[in-house]
Amino acid sequence: MKVRFGVIGTGAIGADHARRISKVLTGADVVAVTDVNRESAESLVHNLDLQAKVYGDGHKLIAAGDVDAVLVTSWGPTHEEFVLAAIEAGKYVFCEKPLATTAAGCRRIVDAEILHGKRLVQVGFMRPYDAGYRMLKKAISENEIGEPLMVHCAHRNPEVPDSYETPMAIQDTLVHELDVLRWLLDDDYVSAQVIFPRTTKYTHSKLADPQIVLLETTKGVRIDVEVFVNCKYGYDIQCSVVGEEGVANLPEPMSITTRKNAQRFEGILTDWKKRFIDAYDVELQDFIEGVKVRELTGPTAWDGLAASVASDACVKSQESGEIIKIEMPPRPSFYR
Ligand code: NAI
Ligand code: ISE
């Protein structure tokens, strides 16, 4: 039996996920789509040659009898409403990050899922599915570099739209590190601080860019993440874990080395879609397999909440400049 998806939000990642579900992955079809911009939903159906119905809104799509699983790829502030509606309808839901824009919103989702009594939600944190991060995790768990002491990261985008403002560096961009580093270190955060270096001339008045985020974990690991979203030269994700016995670095994406005109060079990707293309494929295939056997194993609503609690602290620190304590509520046994 194929898993029948309904897609809410047919913009950049919604269209890309619809493509992978219908053309790349196995065991699923897109049977329903909706977007506040109806033309966008209609052109997706046309471009991918889908046998899918276009719905007037997300709630009608969730209620549709032939939709088994909902893919939420609309704007962040709409996620909570759709995820809660899917849980209420007893449907599986894959929600792109952020699960909700505040920790309070994530908590409402966690509570609703626990009340339902069975996992229905997977959050679109794809980095734990990336082969490079998996290698890094293996090196740490097999004690190849000893106990981790420090982590140095960079999250660089070539550019962002004008609608991208200072808090989005945390809520939209850093949130990937907030998730993957908890997973990598098997740890939680206890404090966060954001500091602002000299600002690039390529930004605008509502976006302080770059930013440096300093995090501390319960085990005392210190993390620095440079978030630089107008770096111009490419989409570049770096992660270096310094342990007691050695250092493990996230591998660079595979690329040919070209020798030409007395130079030797390697290309750098510019698009997040390409950088994590395999990870997106694997995370969604994993969700499909989970829906089939009624047992999801990917990033949970609790992971969404944990990232959001840390994210809220970082945004507070952006505003005050202070070190903000992070207090994670105790993890319910449901998510152990
Ligand atoms: P986008 O702006 O390209 O697309 C969002 C689409 O949702 C738009 O077509 C918009 O009209 C539609 N939409 C907004 N509100 C709606 C509603 N109430 N009902 C139906 N449709 C609605 O944005 P993009 O880049 O595709 O991002 C969407 C979400 O995916 C965001 O939460 C973003 O953070 C996340 N994302 C995750 C990535 C990842 O690496 N995991 C990468 C890019 C985006
Ligand atoms: C975007 O929404 C993503 O999720 C990308 O992975 C991230 O690199 C980018 O900064 C975000 O805006």
Image (spheres, grey):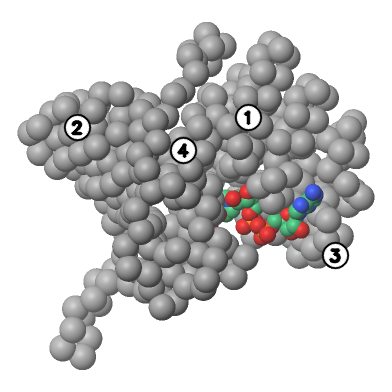
Which numbered disc, 3 or 2, marks the residue closer to the eye? 2
Tell me the number on the disc at residue 313.
4
Task: Give me the residue at 28% from left, 41% from top.
Answer: 223
Which numbered disc, 4 or 2, marks the residue closer to the eye? 4
Q: Which of marks 1 and 3 is nearer the N terminus?
A: 3
SS of the residue at dot 3?
A: helix
- Mark 1–mark 3 Cα distance, whole angstroms, equals 33 Å
The local crowd at label 4, few if under 14, some if 14 to 19, many if 20 or more residues have their Cα within 10 Å, is: many
Q: In this view, does 110 lie to the left or right of 39?
A: left
Kindly check if marks 1 and 2 are in contact, taking CB atoms under 8 A apart as contact: no
Q: What residue type is labelled 1?
A: Ala
| Residue 42 horizontal/vertical position (percent) | 85, 61
- Mark 1–mark 2 Cα distance, whole angstroms, equals 31 Å
Q: Mark 3 points at which residue?
A: 39
Kindly check if marks 3 and 4 are in contact, taking CB atoms under 8 A apart as contact: no
Q: Mark 1 points at which residue?
A: 104
Kindly check if marks 4 and 2 are in contact, taking CB atoms under 8 A apart as contact: no
Q: Which amino acid does label 4 sit on?
A: Ala
- Mark 4–mark 1 Cα distance, whole angstroms, equals 13 Å
Tell me the number on the disc at residue 148.
2
The local crowd at label 1, few if under 14, some if 14 to 19, many if 20 or more residues have their Cα within 10 Å, is: some
- Mark 4–mark 2 Cα distance, whole angstroms, equals 23 Å
Query: Which residue sits furthest top?
Result: 333
| Residue 43 horizontal/vertical position (percent) | 81, 65
- Mark 3–mark 2 Cα distance, whole angstroms, equals 50 Å
| 122 versus 268 height, above or below | above
Q: Earlier in the sequence, mark 3 or mark 4?
A: 3
Q: Quadrant of residue 196?
A: bottom left
| Residue 301 horizontal/vertical position (percent) | 59, 27
Q: Earlier in the sequence, mark 3 or mark 2?
A: 3
